[in-house]
């Protein structure tokens, strides 16, 4: 697997994970009787949307696409800071994306 494919796969995985986790948290907050907020799930959905949009924009507009991927990855870290694996994946995506930018 080439480094570009690894970056693309990791970015796609992170974007889908953010959107799915954010949607699940929004549904849980809507159906539970507790005091569930939508700020953190909203940042997950927004971060995932930015990551996926940046991934789609990378071939025609590389600098804009890679910037959106980095911003979306960092935005999702705010909501997933309590876990270990997801922030590590997000940081890896940012590093891979920036490395690809430097080598291009």
Image (spheres, grey):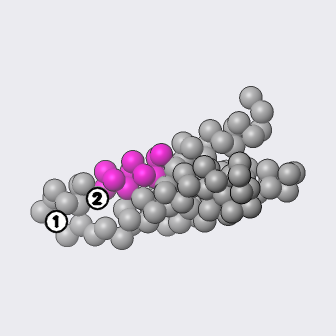
> Depth-wise, is mark 2 or mark 1 nearer the camera?
2
Check disc 2: other Cα within 10 Å, few if <14, some if 14-19, many if 20+. some
Residue at numbered disc 1: 34
93 left or right of 26 in image: right
Q: How many marks?
A: 2
2 and 1 marks in contact (CB < 8 Å): no
Residue drawn at 38 percent across, 65 percent down: 42
Q: Quadrant of the N terminus?
A: top right
Main secondary-structure element of the magenta-colored stretch: helix
Q: Position of residue 54 (x, y in %)?
A: 61, 56
Examine the structure image and report whether residue 18 is included in the region drawn in magenta: yes
Q: Position of residue 85 (x, y in %)?
A: 54, 48
Quadrant position of residue 2: top right
- Residue 83 or residue 35, whichever sits in front: 35
Residue 66 visible in the current orientation: no
Specify start and end residues of the magenta stretch as a single range: 16-25
């Amino acid at each position: 697997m080439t480094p570009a494919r690894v970056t693309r796969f990791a970015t796609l995985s992170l974007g889908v994970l953010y959107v799915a986790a954010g949607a699940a948290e929004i549904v849980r907050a809507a159906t539970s009787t507790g005091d569930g907020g939508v700020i953190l799930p909203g940042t997950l959905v927004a971060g995932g949307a930015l990551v996926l949009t940046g991934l789609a924009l990378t071939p025609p507009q590389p600098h804009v696409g890679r910037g959106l991927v980095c911003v979306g990855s960092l935005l999702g870290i705010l909501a997933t800071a309590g876990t270990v694996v997801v922030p590590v994946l997000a940081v890896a995506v940012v590093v891979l994306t920036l490395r690809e930018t430097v080598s291009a």
